[in-house]
Image (spheres, rainbow, N blue to C red):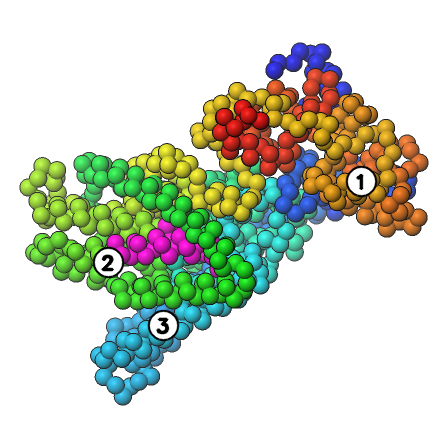
Amino acid sequence: MRLNDTDLDIRTQKIPVLTYNDSLDNSIEDSTIESTTTSKTSRSTRKRYRNKTFIDWIYEYELAKHVKETVTKNGSPLLQMYIPKSKWVVLGISSVTMGVLVVLIDFLSLWLHDKKYGYCSGHLVTIRSNCEEGQWKGWSQTIFTFMNSDTVFHGIGNLVICLVLSGIFATMAVLITTKYSFSAHSGIAELKIILNGLIINGFLNIEVVLSKIFGIIMVVAAGIWAGKDGPLVHISAGICNFFLTKIPNLHSQNQALKRELIAATTAAGIALAFNSPIGGILFVFEQFSGSIGIHSLMWPGFVSSTIAVTVMKALHPFDDIITGNLFVVTEDKNWLNVELIPFIFLGCLGGFLGVLFNQLNIRLQRFRVVKFMGSRQAQLLDVLAVCLITVLLSYGNSFSGLTLTEMTSALFTDCSKSKYGVLCGASTLQSDNLEFPWKLCLVLLSTFCQGMLLSAYTVGGNIPGGILLPSLTIGALVGRLFGTILKYYQLRYPSLDIFMNCNSEGQCISPGSYAVIGAASFLTGVTRMTITVIAIMMEVTGALTYVLPVMIGVLFSILTNSILSGKSSYELWLKLNDYPYLRPGIEEFVNPDLTRIPCHRLFKPTNQLFVICKDKFVTVNDICDILESANVSGFPVLEKEGGKFIGYISSYELQLELDKLLDIEGVDRSTAVTLNPSSSDYSLEGILETNLLILPPEMDLLTCYDFFQKMSTSIAIFCDSKNQLVGIFSRVDIIELVEKSGVELERL
């Protein structure tokens, strides 16, 4: 609909269209705006939000602007100098703290993990990979010294001790997370929607952060198929939130600015998880930039990830657990043009398996909710069962005793440099014996199946755990298996034309390179991240020559995901938990008929809406009855019955104001309230929102969805050219409508 000047003037007499009026009081103190609503009551005009509702981004940014102006005009010179720089103080301290915490987490988790299998004789604090040859002792050999060290009894004894210690670690992780429920899971999915504007009370509390630190140490020590990546992102956000409350700054009292700084700090979480500063910055762009401008994330994210990784590098007691330069490219080991076809196939396979993993993960989480979420004991038994099964399945294979990071390192590393015999034994094409490497292929295939099932079930359980590192490991297993088979055929048939460009030793197929591409492809298929994955793989491996193959794998993986699903694991998790998340770029995945369906066809009739008329008196009891009986997010306010729309009052603020009134002596539920400030009765005008974005009812449904997604608002108000209310959509309404088919919408 195109409005002429007359219509536009009529619509904007009372309500600004796509603008926000400057209605803030200039008397600002401590980032709070105070005003008097009537002569009888006074309240803060600072907007307040109910849990699980979205912030008003426009209001928050306007508030921040006024606070800065007030500080500039009325603050001392020292305050004027400090306030603009305060966010860098918070950012720097948070990043340094994260660097130190990750060193602690890495050391304790790996040290405890190794202690399940034994100890380094004479060096109790030394981890297994740094223990000198012959110094590592199993527990059974130490306890039962009178028995021959080669007996089966020692093997069984070591397994039992490993099971017991793994169970203890898993139990400790469950006990701490059941006390603080937000410390379970990854945390990235919830952060996506929190940084999009949703209020989730308690998610970033310091108690949750500390319990998550303890929990992830226990999870890694237990050997469960879950990564530390997601928890580190959650921890970094919580650490930033903690220092925001302790260090004087402008951001702590402003919901929009706070989210900008927290989002930038999360770059440190990914940077520390993978030793990938650039990957951390790009991760924030791809996951958290929905409502926050890139300019607000780039430089702060760069500073945060750089400081955190520098601190970790300087303090880390050992380098073996930090993956870096694993797959080294030399002049005589490069990829061939003919390998583009296997790279494309591996990309499609990674995308398909990523979608399969996501669907399996969601189905298993639904099963867990039904079977094991009834009590604390059931949750403990659930995690213990997963832990013990993981240990039993992995104990006998050649990757026994490796963390996910160590396993990925082994898979990325070619045989000339690998120290893991299973990948480079005589049966793995490193000798004249050109028999098909059945043993290696079976080990890789069985470990892949184990990782696929256990990780899909574990991630989302009642313990901290991320999905990124398991995805890399699973993808690396697939890629290594595929590369090993190709390597066999290359050595078996060296005279084929496709292998004519191999070097003098007949070396050209690198199984390690296929592990890298498989890891990137699978991770993209799971998370739908692209540039971030490429950057992480390049920083982790140092194989710049393989940028193009990795990009090809990622490209075909994301295409496969788009065809089969179009959703990431984080989006599926948000939907599973009924969070009102709006996906960006939904035009590619929804019915095109949505562009031809106007919103006004889907509104509830206005006579079915609860409205407040400005010219009428209502009692506190009348409003309380509506609030108690109807589940409404707020009330449109009209001049009179059937009159012009003048504003909106949220149910939450209305309830708070009524509670405040009832605390006044002489006020009871029969007291009359009004929206007329000149009335002698109690006025609610102070909580009336008049600065609203008004939409035309002719707007199509897909454009309305885009409005919700871009503006991160909770409601959309629709008025006609005469400024009369036509209808209201909530965020939940638009999500439900977009997910319907065109036929279903036609029936509405």
Q: What stretch is highlighted in magenta?
A: 445-471
In magenta segment, residue 93? no
- Mark 2 surroundings: few (<14), some (14-19) or many (≥20) residues within 10 A: some
Compare marks 1 and 2 and give the one earlier in the sequence: 2
What residue is at 12 percent from the left and 45 percent from the top? 490
Q: Report whether residue 68 is seen.
A: no
Q: Position of residue 210 (x, y in %)?
A: 55, 62
Residue occupying image coordinates x 89% and y 43% = 670
- What's the amino acid at mark 1? Ile
The x and y percentages for residue 212 are 52, 60
Mark 1–mark 2 Cα distance, whole angstroms, equals 67 Å
Q: Of residues 99 and 135, which is closer to you in this image?
A: 135
Residue denoted by label 1: 623
| Residue 458 magenta-highlighted | yes
Q: Where is residue 481 in the image (x, y as percent from the top left)?
A: 23, 50
Distance from Cα at disc 2 to Cα at disc 3: 21 Å
Q: Find disc 3 in the rendering and name its residue.
A: 162
Outermost residue to the bottom: 146
Q: Residue at x 44, y 45 (%)?
A: 569
Establish if 378 lies above or below 255.
below
Amino acid tagged 3: Cys
Image spot of residue 206 (x, y percent): 60, 59
Whether residue 623 sits left or right of residue 578 in the image: it is right
Circle 1 SS class:
helix
Secondary structure at badge 3 equals: helix
Category of crowding for the residue at label 1, using alpha-carbon neighbours closer than 10 angstroms: few (below 14), some (14–19), many (at least 20)? some
In what element is the residue under mark 2?
helix
Which residue corresponds to mark 2? 443
From this view, report whether residue 142 is shown above or below residue 671: below
